[in-house]
Image (spheres, rainbow, N blue to C red):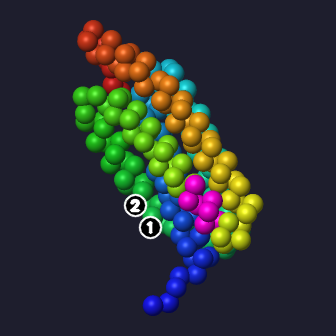
Amino acid sequence: MAGTDIKAIYTTALQNTHALEQQGLQQIEHQLSGLGQYPQYRSALEAQKQIGTKHMGRLDKALAAVGGSTSGFKEGVMSVAGKIGAAVHATASDETLKNLYAGYAYQFDKVAAYKSLAVIAEQAGHADAASEFRTSMTEDKASADVIDGMIESITRDYLKLATSGQKADS
């Protein structure tokens, strides 16, 4: 069995991470429209959206450096997955909390993806990109910390709204 060339592995990892970021940005966009009662959460998502857009730029630059492009198929699948995930949460009676949990988990998914991508980039001879991916990893850890810091307060706000008959979900 022939081995796979490191450039192919790197290009695939870039495409996969790009699709992951795209999915997250779509989910964030969907959530932003319904968070009027949670300004702290809305602000955190807006910041994550800006960070995710910056990450997409880093990934686009790295893909261009290896002559690759985004995978239309992967982007499409991840787009559908993001929309389905948001739609499933929208049918739940606790949509806001489920989105909060999913957003928290998503940040750690990205941390792992960027940690791995940095190693792959180094092994493929792209130390400059590896450094950028470590920056993305650090930014995603910080975003996870922000969400972690608000889980309890958002849950309390949710309970207060829901038990008083007010609109607690979007």
The residue at which mark 2 appears reads as: 77
- Give the tally of numbered discs: 2
The residue at which mark 1 appears reads as: 73
Q: Which part of the image, by quadrant, shows the C terminus?
A: top left
Q: Is residue 24 left or right of residue 5?
A: left
Residues at circles 1 and 2 in contact by the CB criterion of under 8 Å = yes
Q: Which amino acid does label 1 sit on?
A: Phe
Front residue (pair 68, 34): 68
Q: Residue at x 28, y 16 (%)?
A: 162
Q: Is residue 117 magenta?
A: yes
Give, as a single range, the part of the protein colored magenta: 115-121
Q: Residue furthest bottom?
A: 1
In percent of width and height, residue 8 lies at 57, 77
Q: In this view, does 158 lie to the left or right of 51?
A: left
Estimate the spatial distance between the alpha carbons at disc 1 and disc 2, rounded to whole Å: 6 Å
Up/down of 93 relative to 117, above or below: above
